[in-house]
Image (cartoon, grey):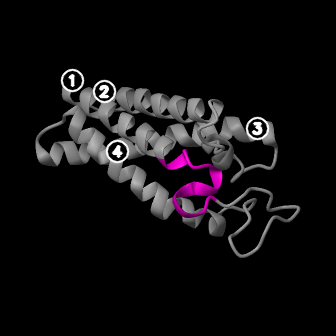
Amino acid sequence: MNWPFLLLWGLISTLILTTVLSAAQGLGLTRISLLFVLGTLFTSDRDLAKLIGFLVHLINGWWIALIYAAVFHSLGMATWWLGAGMGLIHALFVLVTVFPLLPGLHPRMATEQRGPTPTRELEPPGFLALHYGRGTPLAVVVSHMIYGAVLGIGYRLA
């Protein structure tokens, strides 16, 4: 495993994923700001939360790239389409498992059963994160498939 290449392509893939999700929000396809949601896990300062969320997302992108690389290595191949397929599985896991767990873990997120309070201001994502808009699942799937495809290309170059 080529660690410098993996770190480089993990960074590139994560930056692209983050850009796609941010663009989807800016274009009104989704209301979710993953950076804000991640950052508010650690601070109630709304401006600082975005910076912290970016750093957390970057670190997550790096360690998740290790999982992708392990799969590429174990299969003995790395292609854009294999990476995109893994990205689809990754996105479905995030939508179906991770997002629904957030209200139980996030100190500033309301739950489905109990609405907002002064400390729990964030809306829960709901099934497939649909509370953040009908385009949210598509934005999450597309961004993660691109992440995987870029990692597949990068790992193949290593």
Report how far apart the C-alphas of labels 4 and 3 lie in the structure.
29 Å
Span highlighted in magenta in the image: 125-137
Report how far apart the C-alphas of labels 1 and 2 lie in the structure.
8 Å
N-terminal-most mark, 4 or 3? 3
Q: Counting other residues with Cα less than 10 Å from the Cα at mark 3, is it few (<14), some (14-19), or many (20 or more)?
A: some
Given the image, on which type of amino acid does mark 1 rest? Leu
Residue that label 4 marks: 87
Element type at mark 3? helix
Q: Which mark is residue 5?
A: 2
Given the image, on which type of amino acid does mark 4 rest? Gly
Element type at mark 2? helix
N-terminal-most mark, 4 or 2? 2
Q: Which mark is residue 157?
A: 1
Residue that label 3 marks: 48
Residue 153 placed where, x, y %? 25, 28
Is 155 left or right of 114, judged from the image as shown? Answer: left
Q: Quadrant of the N terminus?
A: top left
N-terminal-most mark, 1 or 2? 2
Residue, far bottom: 113
Residue beneath the point at 62% across and 58% down = 125
Residue 133 placed where, x, y %? 62, 49
In front here: 88 or 15? 88
